[in-house]
Image: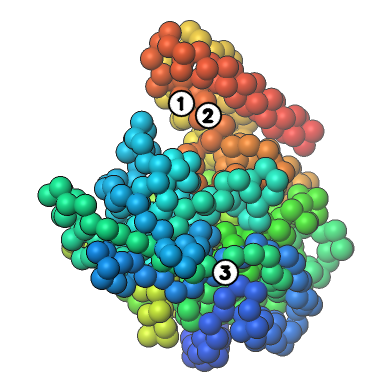
Amino acid sequence: MSAVVQQETGRMTLESLRAEVDGPRMMQDLAGLAQWVKLSGTPEEMEGIRFLQARLDAAGYRTQVLLHDAYISLPGPARVEVDGAPLTAITHSMSRASGPNGVNGPLVDLGTGEAARFAGANLRGALLLVRGIASPDVALRASRAGAAGVLHVSPHEHLHEMCISPVWGNPGLETVADLPSVTVCTISEADGEALAARLAKGDAPRVTLHAKVDTGWRQTPILVGELDAPRGDAGAPFILLSGHQDTWYHGVMDNGSANIGMLEVARLCATRRAEWRRGLRVCFWSGHSHGRYSSSAWYADRNWAELERRCAAHVNVDSLGGIGADVLSDAGCMAPLNALAADAISAVSGQVHAGRRKNRNSDESFPGIGIPSIFGSISMQPAQPDGFRNALGWWWHTPQDLLDKVDEANQVRDTQILLHATWRLLADPVLPLDHAVQADALLEELQGLAPRLADQLPVAEVLAAATRLRDRLARLAASPAEDAATRNRLLMRLSRVLVPLDYVAGDRLAHDPALPQPPWPVLSPLRSLAEAEPGSDAARFATVSAMRACNRLTRALAEAEAVLDAG
């Protein structure tokens, strides 16, 4: 079959599959799944797992439920007392429990809690008033500063449940000390601003945080469903389609709608299995909300070698079909999959994908292995007139995340986009990966740094190597594949080199902290050197790290060229 005929056949199959996405069926299943509050490691969560498993079984998948130990934290009752009067409050997953007498101390207004507000401040024993949704970076700063607690101020009247651990996955010997040592609560915007106003006037309100938190090891489930490609052997490549199934409250949009979208994609793809070039593995994670991605991190660790050898791409799914979620241009993906994301979004909605970098969240536990990833959330909320925007809706992580927050038409649209991308990854003769786009992004970063570092580091050599690799990758992307299997092996080997450089600061076998991360974290020491005052101790310390970063980058670029040389 010629390439043109294959392309036309694939297009017709995609159009047919998209037309078969069944909105009423998905909404009926969503209502069924919504009956349980699926806290990680609870019997109700297992009921949800069995519901999803029955649907995968009916679609013809081999299924199993894996149980593993996970460090899970379930928030209990909380209250905040101000001069003896109670305020409505919640605590957070991985907060330190307060004990029966609560936690108190002088209240200090830290604004939005950025690093500069902590620098040089004596905050030991204090309660920190911080505007914004609770976050792991603030919890880590507060813990290191010796604070007694953090009182977050919601951006509105709704209180959003959060996991505040900066440790990605289960804590190990190297990371257990980074778990929060502070008690953390959240109050409404009105209550928080009233406190801030009192502090601004010089008042010293007596504030006490009360929080019960159930934290410890418990067994949590992972549902795995799998179908092999019809012409593949047991070791053939596969696509990973995944999303978490644990929830805050009933969690109908987050993440019930994504779970149902995954089921619909798995069901429809299975009806055309004869056209697959790769297998499909579908994973439903626990511990996303209450263990900082504990299940996906455990799965990556437990299956590292097999995933490195066989997993061609990861399609991640979170929070589909929200009411009013009409912005599709911001869906995230790793650079090699930009064209695929753009194709899927344009084909279904007509919107133009902005090529937004995929954030490291939503169980993105696989970049160290070198697996390129697409999506997470697909549809977002537009900016609000008051300037506040919660991209997934004001009901996100609240008790109001119920069936009325999912729009059937949006659910169908988002599932069609998910189906389009997943199908192409399964059925395209050559994997739709373009690493030249990734190399372009690296080159742009290096070109911005080079003028400031040319006298201190061998950046000209690194630039030359990056340029050479980018040019070779561009030629590869533009050339037809004489043999699809050979080209696919080459693309997967390139992913193993370039994806970790783009998304991993440390060891490929570990997990970076669950904290904000810049593009190409390998370049962070070079950025620090570029910003340091010349001749200062800070500049000299940064030079040591920057030189090592250059060596790491040079070695990786050479490895990528060796992959190209070997074909």
Q: Position of residue 192 (x, y in %)?
A: 24, 60
The amino acid pointed to by label 2 is: Leu
The residue at which mark 3 appears reads as 214
Q: Please indicate, yes or no, whether residue 381 appears anywhere in the rendered image.
A: no
The residue at which mark 1 appears reads as 527
Element carrying mark 2: helix
Which residue is more in the foreground, 472 or 238? 238
User: Based on the displayed image, in which of its 4 quarters is residue 235 positioned?
Assistant: bottom right
The residue at which mark 2 appears reads as 523
Q: Residue at x 31, y 66 (%)?
A: 81
The CA distance from mark 1 to mark 3 is 41 Å
Q: Nearer the viewer, mark 1 or mark 3?
A: 3
Q: Please indicate, yes or no, whether residue 72 appears anywhere in the rendered image.
A: yes
The CA distance from mark 2 to mark 3 is 39 Å
Up/down of 565 relative to 542, above or below:
below
The amino acid pointed to by label 1 is: Arg
Q: Residue at x 63, y 40 (%)?
A: 500
Q: Is residue 476 left or right of residue 338?
A: right
* Image quarter hosting the C terminus: top right
Q: Residue furthest front?
A: 101
